[in-house]
Amino acid sequence: MHGGDIYSNEHPSGRNLIDFSSNSNPYGPPKGVKANLAMALEHANKYPDIQYRLLKKEIQKHNNLKKKNIVLGNGAGEILDLAIRRVESLLILNPAYSEYEESTNRYDIELFHSKYKHCNVASGPSFCQIYDVNVEDNRKLYQLEVDEEEFWSKFDIADAVVLAHPNNPDGSTFPVDKMQEIINFTKENKKKLIIDETFFDYTHGQMSFTSFLEEDIDLIVIKAITKFYGLPGIRFGYGLCSNESIAEEIAKYQRPWNINAFAENFAIVCFADKDYSKSMNSINKEEREWMTDELIKIKEIKRVYISQGNYILLMLQKIKAEELKRQLIGKGILIRNCDNYKNLGEYHMRVAVKKREDNIKLLTEMKNILG
Amino acid sequence: MHGGDIYSNEHPSGRNLIDFSSNSNPYGPPKGVKANLAMALEHANKYPDIQYRLLKKEIQKHNNLKKKNIVLGNGAGEILDLAIRRVESLLILNPAYSEYEESTNRYDIELFHSKYKHCNVASGPSFCQIYDVNVEDNRKLYQLEVDEEEFWSKFDIADAVVLAHPNNPDGSTFPVDKMQEIINFTKENKKKLIIDETFFDYTHGQMSFTSFLEEDIDLIVIKAITKFYGLPGIRFGYGLCSNESIAEEIAKYQRPWNINAFAENFAIVCFADKDYSKSMNSINKEEREWMTDELIKIKEIKRVYISQGNYILLMLQKIKAEELKRQLIGKGILIRNCDNYKNLGEYHMRVAVKKREDNIKLLTEMKNILG
């Protein structure tokens, strides 16, 4: 169900595979993290601050928050799970990260589904301004967009909605006017809003839903630092809540000291390194756009979805994604087959945006196989 | 509610306090942990194995298990919480670790209480053979023992019981005949048994409840490596289940990748270091017994409880624990006031067994204050 399973027996080369199935930053963490290793180990000899005062203060500063309704998770998934736990019914837009549905199943929460529309950029989608459409064959450029009619009618009956901004596996974001409409509807109809911004750091010129935290609505914005800062293994994410009682409801089901000393230390180091953040963001943008252009050139790729993340969704033409995945493993490359996402099919696959040399390897092998 | 809160504003010296309130190993982790730091950081750049295959294999080996129904927790507390979650009603023996009751409150589980008896060793308690009673005034030596009559009558109506072996805050353990009786009763009456062995590594000549994992009963034994190996900040514990369906019920409420890469790596390093384990165990035993003898010599201490852990429960005579704590903070020492434990009173306190030099400081300051 997840990417990154490079340890499974079906992949004999294991950790040596170039892993395009998981979205971790290939450049590794900020230098300060390594420099801070010994201190983190020293702190690990004591219990962490049970209230994580310093870490919460840094999160508040990093996000320019007035309110301080912060909840900390052993991975963003913990906050996501507890945010979903407190709703009665949930609307999910598909395709979506599989854990949204997993959580509803854990707590017997009623589930509603709505679908993104697959829009061709050449026919004029509303978000295409975020990508400089100057490629060889822009008819292949696609973007997922909210199917408004279906979305509003389903949101009307659901207690809550979870939206990813940008979405995984495609990387689409919500334009400001759409965000405002969602906020208004949430307020007027006393709905609950869960926003998954775990990949938001990769976006450019986008507005974060944190802008609405001061509003009188039931909103949780979920952030992760571990993806963008190349540290998925440290497990750290957090939730920003629009009011104190949401934070209390989340915290009720958390155990003391849920954040490991290494996560606690490294998060603070990561927040401090503004240069790293700026440079990773622009490197990724450049590489993502270059890769998008290159993928379009491969004849047997039918669609390339415009992304604001560090991953790109593709649709193949003749070879099924599972078959391409099988053949690429033989070449030491792991991709993500997307046929288990709702509203995607057997020909959909996702690749991470990695370093140029690895991306070239992927493109070369894909060309060899697809012809 | 917990020890180790050295970050609170009420303790101006913060991290500089000698912390006798938390039970972390003062000698720090095995050397291999430091040597493994760089590799752990490298692994943190990838998602951990979603199934933690290698770690589970090492746990199986470390505990000589035939069955492999292992569940991993971000701290032993995660497993404890999920183990309690699956019962309908729970019996707790008091005094007990506060999280047992916290978990029952989270899930609206019916709670039954039973009390340990405070037995004077001089009057011949059943466990006194585990301590060489050769001290100046053995009338002060106490041990907590199960109040059999109350225990069996309450266990008869509860769905499950949680037992700590050794118990926290006093360090008492269950003798083999009592363990066998509990197992028999559990089996005959289809009860559930949760055994907290997070401090078991410190005991000597004691039998672990893991010996009963092959029986046809509903048993979870919870272990932690982070306390004994001086790494409470890495948050890692695990549960050994007597059958697969228990493990599945626990795992159902866990999120993927709940174990951080540093915890994953260091646990394996710790398991491998048998010398560290042996030497920490014997250093702690020697120091605990020395400290017990020294504490008995302080006139204003009324009771010293025999412990199998790395902490000692005391009962004062004239000064309340809260007042002694306040005065000791002024001397740079933090102790654990135990008045919020059921079945203990305002005069009960707990101290960790630390290094000789720190223990001497504690004893000196206590003598100065208590006279």
Image (spheres, coloured by chain):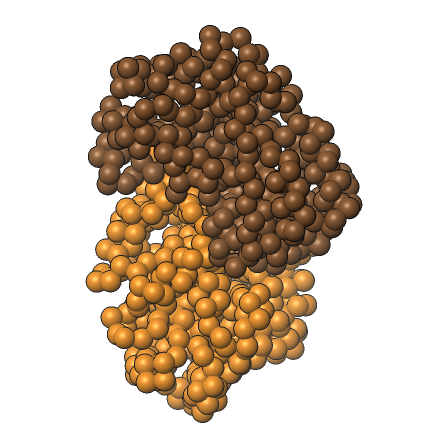
Chain colours: A brown, B orange
Q: Position of residue A155 (x, y in %)?
A: 65, 46
B204 vs A134, nearest the viewer: A134
Q: Position of residue B63 (x, y in %)?
A: 26, 60
The relative height of residue A219 versus residue B359 in the rendered view (above or below) is above
Residue at 55% of width from left, 57% of height from top? A109
Residue at 29% of width from left, 39% of height from top? A7
The relative height of residue B263 versus residue B330 in the rendered view (above or below) is above
Total numbered labels: 0
A6 vs A255, nearest the viewer: A6
Horizontally, residue B171 falls left or right of residue A59, namely left
The quarter of the picture where the N terminus of chain B appears is: bottom right
The quarter of the picture where the C terminus of chain B appears is: bottom right
Residue B331 can be seen, yes or no: no
Specify the quadrant of the image occupied by residue A181. Answer: top right
Residue at 31% of width from left, 36% of height from top? A6
A75 vs B30, nearest the viewer: A75
Q: Position of residue B171 (x, y in %)?
A: 44, 71
Residue at 24% of width from left, 23% of height from top? A331
Residue B342 can be seen, yes or no: yes
Q: Position of residue B296 (x, y in %)?
A: 49, 75
Specify the quadrant of the image occupied by residue B211. Answer: bottom left
A195 vs B261, nearest the viewer: A195
